[in-house]
Amino acid sequence: MRALLSILVGVCVAFTASASQGAIVSVVETNLGGDAAAIIELGTFVEDALSFSDRTHQHNGAAFNAATGLLSTTGTSIIGLPAYLLGQDYVRFANDAKDNANYSAVVTADRPSTFYVLIDNRTNGPAMNTSNPNTEDPVLGGSLQWVIDGGWVRVNTGISPNGQGDFTGVDEGGDGVGAGIGLNQFFSVYRFPQDSQQVTISNPGTGGNMTSLVVVPAGPPPIEGDVNGDMNVDILDYEIIRDNFRNTGVTRAEGDLNFDFQVGFEDFVIWRNAFNAAPAPVPEPGSLALLAVAALGLIRVRRQR
């Protein structure tokens, strides 16, 4: 299994098995009820990739009517999944969570990333139903007000006919193979307005299909043990861990190296191991002495708090 799942006081948390494997490191869902927890998929957003954690629906490229240029489940003008999404990390949410009241999911990455959300075209947010044609963009507002409030931007890279925005298709039976085959519905693609390490999304609040999320890293993975992002593992990183020891609701830049939203002894161990493994400009005894001083300092902080 690619994710480790745990239930904590009505909050579902999905963690990747190893932060070094991909950009997404956790998904924290609220008001999931008894629905299946989200699953983090690493580097596998491709044609025929599973869409949800509780269905056999598949992501596929969209199809258009060759004459009108409109989306069509039987169209012969086929556009594959957008190239910028291929091979990226994504989240499989439960389709049954699509209409859960006050549902939200906080998705965290290990580095600044571009977040893309895919929304069922049929969603009419203000009417809170699926009355919108699946050939058109969803109607924002209402149950989709979170898209507006979050500043999500409709993506248009010019791959669709007639100047339309970018779309993806959904094979709800999971029985088609390849782009444009076996399609039933379509998603519109939206992008978070700036690169970030964390976003909060919601559901469409109606029937239809649950939202999907794809994460594209904006840079290389962080160096193990490097808290302040200066590409070095040194005493400066330790000092950040020490100063934020036992704090919660924190980020990597504040010392949370294992992405459990708190700074603890485990984070110090990650830094220590990385520091000890890094090429040392001073003799090894000096490194050991520095580690000893750091450990003592952390223990002192631990006792004081």
Image: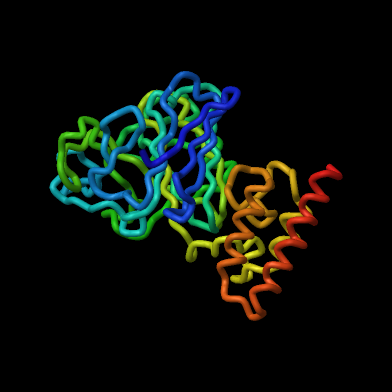
Question: Is residue 52 rendered to the left or right of residue 261?
Answer: left
Task: Tell me which residue sits at (73%, 61%) in the image.
Answer: 292
Image coordinates of residue 181 in percent, x first then y, are: 16, 42
Image coordinates of residue 13 in percent, x first then y, are: 52, 34
Q: Is residue 108 above or below residue 13?
A: below
Quadrant of image for the C terminus:
top right
Image coordinates of residue 186 in percent, x first then y, are: 30, 39
Most foreground residue, 206 or 229 = 229
Q: Quadrant of residue 74?
A: top left
Most foreground residue, 95 or 131 = 95
Q: Is residue 280 above or below residue 81?
A: below
Q: Is residue 9 above or below residue 28?
A: above
- Residue 141 shows in this picture: no
Task: Tell me which residue sits at (69%, 63%) in the image.
Answer: 237
Question: Is residue 60 rendered to the left or right of residue 127?
Answer: left
Residue placed furthest toward the right: 304
Please state the total of marks drawn on the protein image.
0
Quadrant of image for the N terminus:
top left
Residue placed furthest toward the front: 285
Image coordinates of residue 36 in percent, x first then y, are: 41, 26
Q: Quadrant of residue 117?
A: top left
Task: Tell me which residue sits at (30%, 35%) in the image.
Answer: 134
- Residue 27 shows in this picture: yes
Question: Is residue 232 rendered to the left or right of residue 170?
Answer: right
Residue placed furthest toward the top: 34
